[in-house]
Amino acid sequence: CPMYIDPGAMNKVILLQRQDPDTEAWSDVGKIHARVNKSGGGQTFDAGADQHPYVLDFDVRYGLLVSPLAYAPHLYRIVYAGHTFKVVDTDDYMEGHQYLRIRGRMYE
């Protein structure tokens, strides 16, 4: 069954930003309505330290602003609720181009 998101659930506004690979400066791509949900989470081990990163899934409508994320997620970040999230993964369910799930990990 294809991913369906109730449009009424997309009630949070996120700011998508893109980093220029040459200057490393961040610029605004645009504000987008999203459904925000805590990711399944997980646990990572970094230099022997037990880490529990804060990870959110941002579900947005597929469109011109977000389509480039599928091929270069490392160039993007999301600003939401006063926090910045590095884009670590995207999912365009079965390449249906209807919704895009963007997984973001909060910067430490």
Image: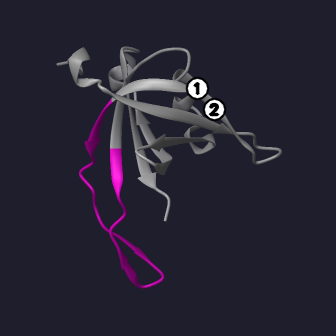
Identify the residue position indicated by label 2 in the image: 28
Q: Residue at x 35, y 58 (%)?
A: 54
- Mark 1 closeness class: few <14, some 14–19, many ≥20 residues within 10 Å: few
Counting residues from the start of the chain, the first of labels 2 and 1 encountered is 2
Q: Residue at x 82, y 44 (%)?
A: 22
Left of 55 or right of it: where is 8? left
- What stretch of residues is rendered in magenta? 35-56
Q: Amino acid at mark 1?
A: Pro
Left of 106 or right of it: where is 72? right
Toward the viewer: 78 or 64?
Answer: 78
Q: Residue at x 64, y 36 (%)?
A: 18
- Residue 23 visible here: yes
Dots 2 and 1: beta carbons under 8 Å?
Answer: no
Looking at the image, is 16 positioned above or below residue 77? above
Q: Is residue 76 magenta?
A: no
Total marks placed = 2
Q: Judging from the image, what secondary structure is the residue with disc 2 in?
A: strand
Q: Nearer the viewer, mark 2 or mark 1?
A: 2
Toward the viewer: 17 or 2?
Answer: 17
Q: Quadrant of residue 57?
A: top left
**Residue 91 x, y percent position in the rendering:** 38, 32
**Residue 14 x, y percent position in the rendering:** 44, 33
Q: Residue at x 34, y 46 (%)?
A: 56
Kindly report the distance in space between the C-alpha atoms of the residues bearing marks 2 and 1: 14 Å
Looking at the image, is 21 positioned above or below residue 28? below
Identify the residue position indicated by label 1 in the image: 68
Left of 44 or right of it: where is 47? right
Q: Amino acid at mark 2?
A: Asp
Q: On the rendered image, what quadrant is the N terminus found in?
A: top left
